[in-house]
Amino acid sequence: MPSHLSADRSAAQPPGRGSVDALISQTRRLKGEVDAVRRGTPADAADPRNRFQRALYDLALHQLNDLDEHLAQLREAPRHASGPSSPAPPVPRQGSLVSRVGSAEWNLLTDEANWSPELYGLLGRDPAAPPLTLDELPSLVLHEDRPKLTAMVTGCLVDGRPIDGEFRVVLPDGGVRTMHMMGEPVLGADGSTASMWAVLRDVSELRRCRRAVSETRDSLHHQRQAAEQIEHRLAVELQEAVLPARHGTLRLPHTGPRGARPRADRPGLDIAALHLPSSTGPRIGGDWYDALDLTDGTTLLSVGGLTGQGVAVASARAMLLGAVRGMAMAGTTPGPLLTCLNGLLDATVQPALGSALCLRYRSGSRSLVWARAGRLAPLLFRGRTGRVLEAPEGMPLGAASGAVYGQAEETLLPGDLLLLPTDGLVPGYAGAEAAHRLLATLAPRITGATTAQDCVRAMVREFGEQHREDDACVLVARVTD
């Protein structure tokens, strides 16, 4: 077979034996390390993550084995090319890289073909049969891959472009093998293409490994998407159970003093609530609002939130709100109630940070007792002005063990309106700045509001369409008598 060199190219000098030996040693050491990690990976085929990792390790070992065999050939090449007296190269073992690589050259002037013995084996051809010409070669190729092979050969012969591509061949036993073909045109003395040489490599196993990696990656992606959808659905269901409505009048599940029957027109507080979801995606946050008529004739109002998103936070929020209701029904006042909530969060298996604003209103005396933990104080709108109620500072829930929360008291007047916001209601503002923005924006708009729902509508118009990183809640209570 003629030399695989174009007429306008010079042969590169082979690397020194010592440098190749060093590369072989490094490759084999790396193979051993990868194989050791692979053996340490659990072989549980039912776990897609384990399948994915083992497929990647198999692919890496396959390529390192090929590199090892390539380097071994490179080391032996100078010895085997020294002349007729050199010993014959070793017979390739079945399945080795040498047995998976063959070469060929097609002479365009004589229409002759020359195949290496390995290529006969790769293509399942009888070694005694004549090699196929370029016109006959497509007969071995899958029908859908023939245009690809034709384009590669035409580009090489007509345009002088190197060949580098893959196609599938059908073996005599019906099996299919993926071949990677690399080649170049060989130019004659007049500069025209005299022949074409090519090296063909069986990459079936390599492609199988890559398909396994790709399929496992896709499977993991689909499973992750399904898990996220289930998590989101659970979080939404928990949120809907905790937050009765996105907006609108909040109906109190009150029983009244001494078990009196509920009355929708019961005087005292007109209450409405609003939940504004995050603009960044479907994840569910940990904010809540709640209002509950208690058996002693008082009304519990609360807003709060937990850090984080998803079903775990939604579940913890439901637990926390249940604790708030339970302690309030037992008569616990806002300050001690927040102290107990802090201890509850501190004792959970997965500690979390939270904040809360808790108020207890008695309609007979119009007295309001309240406490806060890491949250903006209530805003009181009276007449045409508004102000932030003063109260003892309270650190976030779960921030410190043994924290004690104080409480404050305020007397309300008919027509007063209380605003209980959570963080993020005013995007881009927090703390005192958020309170100032709410006071300046809402005071003129809610002066003529006759119901709590009118105030909620004003907040929707002002803040509802703004981009927010997290969800937010607000509860509005208006004194009606």
Image: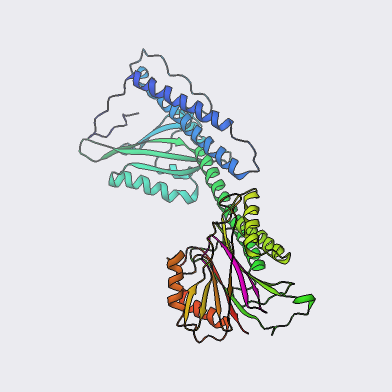
Question: Is residue 387 covered in magenta?
Answer: no
From the image, which quarter does the C terminus lie in? Answer: bottom right
Q: Foreground: 3 or 225?
A: 225
Name the spot of residue 33 as percent of width and height, x first.
50, 27
Depth order, front residue of 421/248: 421
Q: What residue range appears in magenta?
A: 358-377
| Residue 366 part of the magenta-drawn span | yes
Toward the top, the furthest residue is 85
Residue at the location (54% across, 63% down)? 282
Q: How is the image coloured?
A: rainbow
Q: Quadrant of residue 478?
A: bottom right
| Left or right, 116 with reference to 416 | left
The quadrant of the image that shows the N terminus is top left
- Picture coordinates of residue 164, whole percent (x, y): 37, 42
Q: Residue at x 45, y 68 (%)?
A: 434
346 above or below 85? Answer: below
Q: In this orientation, which residue lies closer to the viewer: 110 or 241?
A: 241
**Residue 477 percent coordinates (x, y):** 59, 77
> Does residue 208 appear in the picture of this structure?
yes
Residue at 57% across, 40% down: 175
Q: How many marks?
A: 0
Q: Main SS of the magenta segment?
A: strand
Which corner quadrant of the image does residue 235 belong to? bottom right
